[in-house]
Each structure stands twice: as C-alpha cells, then as structure tokens.
Image: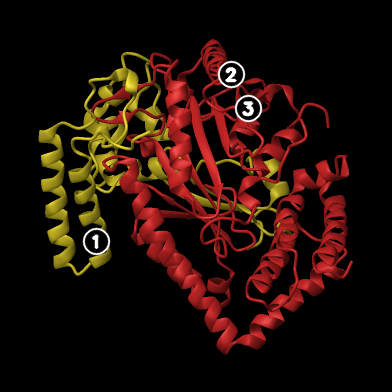
Amino acid sequence: MGGLPAFESDTEWLRGEGAACDVVMSSRVRLARNLAGIPFAPKMSDDDREEVLERSRAQILAGGVHPKVMWIDLRQISPLERSVLVERQLISGQLASGKAFGHSGGGRGAGEKRARGVAVGLPDERLSIMVNEEDHLRIQVIRSGLGLAQALEEVVRADDALEAGLDYAFGARFGYLTCCPTNVGTGARFSVMMHLPGLRLTGEIEKVKRAADDMGLAVRGFHGEGSETTGDLYQLSNQTTLGKSERVLLSEIEREIVPRVADYERHARRVLTERRREVLEDQVHRAIGTGLHARLLATGEAMAVLSAVRLGAVLGVVEGIDQSAVNALMLAVQPAHLQRVLGRELNQQERKGERATLVRERLARALGAG
Amino acid sequence: MMCSRCGEREATIHEVVIDSDGERAEEHLCEVCAQEAGVNSNVQVPIAQLISSFVVAEPGSEPEPARARPGGSCSSCGLTYGDFRKTGLLGCESCYDAFADRLTPLLQRAHEGGTHHVGRSPARGAGVKTIGASEAAARVAQLRRQLAEAVRNERYERAAQLQREIDGIETIRGDGGTGS
C-alpha cells in the first residue's frame, strides 16, 4: 500500500499499560474547534474547506503543536488506507468517507473529493488532529489505561499551540461554538474504553449501561457513536459539554464513574473466579479452542475470542500468555489491518479465512505453544 | 438480530429514520445490504438523529412545530431552523445568536441544565470572561434548586453530581479553567 507510511509503534490504545489497565484499555480527550468567520460544515463551500485545510495544516506544521507530526491529506490515500487510520482510532469513519455533514446533494462518492486531512503525532500516535470533520478541527489525545488527566494536559497543549495562529469561533455565553450544539461549551469529550467481559458473563452489563445512562454518560461500542460492541469493549463518555469546566467533567468521569464501573467489573471477575470458576474456565478454553482451530472467523467472532483470552490471562486461568501479543491481535484482525498485514485486498469471505489463519498462528505463539 | 432486508445475515447497522412527518422507523441491516442501500457503516449520525428526534418530540411544539413557528433564517449563513431540525447541525457561529431562543431549552436539556459556558477560553481572546460573577451565581442558584429536588426524590447519585458541579463552579470562578 503506497501512501501511508509504516507506523513506528503499536497503537497507543492497545498498549495495555497504565492505571487500571486490567479493565481500562485507553482514555481519550477530544476537543471540537472551529475557525472564526468560516461557516460550519453544512454551509461550507469547497473553497472554505480548502482554506480551513490549508490554514490548519500550516499551523500544525509550524511546530509547537507536537515535535514530530505526520500530515495526511485524506484525498490522496486509498479507502483501505483510510480504514487503517479508522481502526487505529486516529480518524472517524465519517472523516474517512468524507461523507457530508448536513450537506445535501453531491451524490454518492462526492465525499471522496472533499478537502480533509489528519495530523498524527509520532512516534506514539497519541495525538491526532482531524481537519474538516463535523467541526473544522477535532483535536484528540489517546492514552493507554486510565489517563484522562494526562490526555487533557496534552490536548490542551496542542490546542494552545493551534490557537496561537488560528482564531477560534468562541462566544462568552456558549463557549467554543461547535457545529452540533451537543458539543458546545468546552467542546470537550472525555471517553474511556473499558474491557468488561466479567459483567457480560455475570449478566450485569445492562445494569451498568442503565446506571451510566442515569449519570448522563453515553455507552458506545468500539468505534464510538453508532457502533456495535465488540470484544466486550465499551466506550464511556460524557454527554454534557456546556456548563461544566473541563476539570469538572474530567473529575466526574475519571474519579467517580470509571473507578466505580471498574470495581463492578473486578467484582464480577472475583465472583467468576471464586464461585463460578468452571464457567470462567469453560469460556476461556472454548475461546482458545476456537482461536486455535477455527478456519473462518468474522471480526466480531475473533474479537470475542481475544476478549476471553485476555480475561483468562488477567485472571490467571491460563498462564504465561504474552498479553501484548493478544492486544496487538485485536488490531490485526480488523478488516483493513488484516489486508495491510497481508499486503493485498481481500473480499469478506477471504478475510474470514485469512483472519482465522492469522489468529491460529499468532495465538499459538502468544500461548507459548507455537 | 437478522438483517431486515435479506434476512440472512446478522444486522450490524441499526438506523432510526425520522421522516418529515416526525414518523420514526427503525431499520436493521447487515453490512452488505447497508452498503447497497448507501448507508455508511462507519457513520456517526446518531447524535444528529438524537437531536432531530428530540426537537421533533419537544413538548408543546406539536402538532406542526415547523410551520407553526416560522423562525426565519440565520442572516449570516442562511440556515433555517428547519434545516437544523433535519440534521441537528448549525451552519455557522452566528446561528447560535440567530436561534438563541429556540436553542436555549434544547441546550439545557442536552447539557443537564447547563446554559452558560464554564471552563477554558482562547488565550487570544484575553479579557473574554467565560462566566461572569452574576452568571455564575445564577447558575449556582439553579443547581442548588435542582440539588434540593434530587434529594427530595432520593436521587442521591444525581445529587452528588450536582454538588460536584456546584463545587466546580465555585473553584473555577476566579481562575478561569484548566491551566495549561
């Protein structure tokens, strides 16, 4: 694959390090910003989009935002390469497709040509800045484990560096003005990706979802809004952005909510190890069996296998698992990464076969049996 | 759940469609049928749908909210309130002023009663105070009322949350938000 350079490290959100990493995969803070004096996405002309892209690119590359940045014009890479960026959580699916935000007309495929880009901080890919998403700028920092405070600090630094050369749309009453009023105010979205297999096995996951809902949090799947849950990964994020400062939002989610959900999950895992050991062992070993022997695996199925293996490793059901290899597999089984690893495009059926082969080989190695 | 078109594959894309009459219909599609139907599997629309469903469902605005309240359009970008209702997206920064009256209750509902920004502000707009003392006081008073009500209804989690928010405003007043 041509346009996209090789990434220098494992993606941050799968490193499996940091606070509470038995339950929390990663933390992300995202700021929505728009440039003053230029219409928002639904009313932007092609020239407006070019201008936003160019001004943002210049400011990002002027230095000060991040020591080493890779700039990618998303019109110049293939759909498959864009999907790789989506799977690495560096861009949204919407930015990848260029699908219109509140636009009408243009027909299918019109999004392809829309001016849009992303800047990725290297080598760790913690920082990414999407340009011409729903808002002109979406600045995000991802940290492994529970690390919203560090992520906020980093994202604020990038925001300040951008703002040094760009005028933001801002009003005293509503704060940072965003295309969708659900983001107005701080424009800040705090999300935590949690691995909650214990709560699913004990049948309590729905309860947690309801509780989160009561607390004004959104619970979403792996790829954010509108996505399905896969591999027992859930994204918790704040829905309120107006009327609470970044620090209040941060403390609510990081100090109050996440630890509580993490404790529920740990309690569920304890119940499983102490009282329902057989069920737990059965689940983990069945998953290993599937992983080691299946000949066709859909993404969701592969993720379910890896989720159970990860749980088995954390709880010591299986000894000596190379956890980082399991984490890396969670990314490698995603459709675009699978094709990237194999170096060619595959249809859905071929992907299932190749995915199963990949899981078989790598899981055997991770289990020390290869 | 199986795909509602082909009935063969597992549905992975769940679409809620709200038509111009405010009718809500759900469609559950597999990846293949979704692609054929031109639905992007990576779309993140639900927020917009949420907003539009929630504007449509706004109590007191029925039966014909749009026509009953012809609200004109934003003088800066030309977006009409009807456009906003369809997509949940605004056209430019001036839309916040143009539709302030109608946005306020909506924002309050979407942001747990929040009506004014608290937190960081652009350094270049130095002198822009994110929240004036009187606004902060009004917000705290409003939160205290909500707190009392939450306690009355024995919603202690909500009460604790409100208390934190009050504390937050009170600490933030004076120092302007997250330091960098």
- Quadrant in the picture for residue B133: top left
**Chain name for mark 2:** A
Q: Are marks 3 and 1 on the same chain?
A: no
**Chain name for mark 1:** B
Residue at the (51%, 37%) spot, across then down: A140
Amino acid at the residue labelled 1: Ala
Q: Are marks 1 and 2 on the same chain?
A: no
Residue designated by label 1? B160
Amino acid at the residue labelled 3: Lys
Residue designated by label 2? A61
Which element is circle 3 on? loop
Amino acid at the residue labelled 2: Leu
Colour in which chain A is drawn:
red
CB atoms of marks 3 and 2 within 8 Å: no
- Quadrant in the picture for residue A186: top left
Residue at the (71%, 62%) spot, across then down: A323
Q: Position of residue A268 (x, y in %)?
A: 51, 77
CB atoms of marks 1 and 2 within 8 Å: no
Which numbered marker is on residue A68?
3
Task: From this view, report whether residue A13 is shown above or below residue A365.
Answer: above
Residue at the (75%, 71%) spot, across then down: A320
Q: Is residue A359 left or right of residue A230?
A: right
Which element is circle 2 on? helix
Q: Where the N terminus of chain B falls, by quadrant?
A: bottom right
Colour in which chain B is drawn:
yellow
Task: From this view, report whether residue B7 is shown above or below residue A77.
Answer: below
Residue at the (56%, 72%) spot, across then down: A200
Looking at the rendered image, the disc whose residue lies closer to the viewer, 3 or 2, is 3
